[in-house]
Image: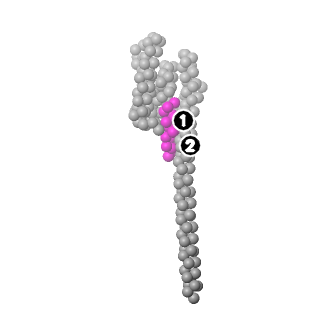
Amino acid sequence: MASPRADAALGISLALVGLTEVIARAVIGGLGAESALGVALLALGSTLPLALLAPSGAAVAICASSVLSLAEFHLLSLAGFAAMLLALYRVGRGPHRHRFARLLGLGVAAPFLLLALIGPSPTSSESAVLTVLLGTFAPVAFLGGLALQARREAEENRAAHRVIADTLVDHTAQSERARIARELHEDRKSTRLNSSH
């Protein structure tokens, strides 16, 4: 897993890229000041939590900001798209002691599927494509992280089983050597007793 510093650097980098992207789009698209501010705040909300929050909290915050941005402004930065996939991957890859994490990962992916199927019609084909791609790849990112976590846990279990098996073999070999030593000792003892009579 990545270090907290790497996560923070990635989240901040994505936030800066996303903010730059949506500001450029707002200027080109001629959005008013209020709309531009809303889009900028949602761009930060769809990327910055990756740097500031634990995986589950980041996924929920990024999902909420991304869904609002797509539903209200029909706009999502590519950085926000990437942040959503990374957040879901991190939720999937995290330790799953509770069913909550699994349900959260799939639950956070679901709104994008709903938006793609029944949400308001995007004004641009790019927004429609991003919505469909998030609806498709959000569950895949989560399940990919989940599969990697399951594989890592299986490898850890195999390693633990090998250690236990090796310990059992060593213990069995030591017991067998001790038994043979006892038998040899008893044989020598009985041989000495027989030769003395």
Q: In the rendered structure, does residue 104 fall within the stretch colored magenta?
A: no
Image side of residue 176 versus residue 65, left or right: right
Color scheme of the displayed model: one colour
Q: Earlier in the sequence, mark 2 or mark 1?
A: 1
Q: Position of residue 84 (x, y in %)?
A: 50, 29
On the picture, is 77 further left or further right than 190?
left
Residues marked 2 and 1 touching at CB (< 8 Å)? no
Residue 67 visible in image: no
| Residue 145, x across and y down, in percent | 53, 37
Which element is circle 1 on?
A: helix
Query: Compared to 33, does 6 lie above or below?
Result: below
Secondary structure of the residue carrying numbered label 2: helix
* Identity of the residue drawn at 42% across and 26% down: 13
For this orientation, the residue located farthest to the front is 195
**Splitting the image into 4 quarters, where does residue 176 fall?**
bottom right
Q: Which residue is drawn at the image coordinates 53% and 46% (left, top)? A: 153
Q: Against 143, is 189 above or below?
A: below
Nearest to the eye among marks 2 and 1: give it.
2
Position above or below: 149 against 61: below
- In three-dimensional space, the C-alpha distance between marks 2 and 1, rounded to whole angstroms, equals 14 Å
Q: Mark 2 sits on what residue?
A: 151
- Look at mark 1 in the image and give the residue it sits on: 142
Q: State the mark number for residue 184.
A: none
Q: Amino acid at mark 1?
A: Phe
x, y (%) of residue 105?
52, 36
- Could you classify mark 1 by the number of other residues whose Cα lies within 10 Å: few (under 14), some (14-19), or many (20 or more)? many
Main secondary structure type of the part rendered in magenta:
helix
Is residue 138 or residue 110 the one in the foreground? 138
Q: Which residues are magenta?
A: 85-101
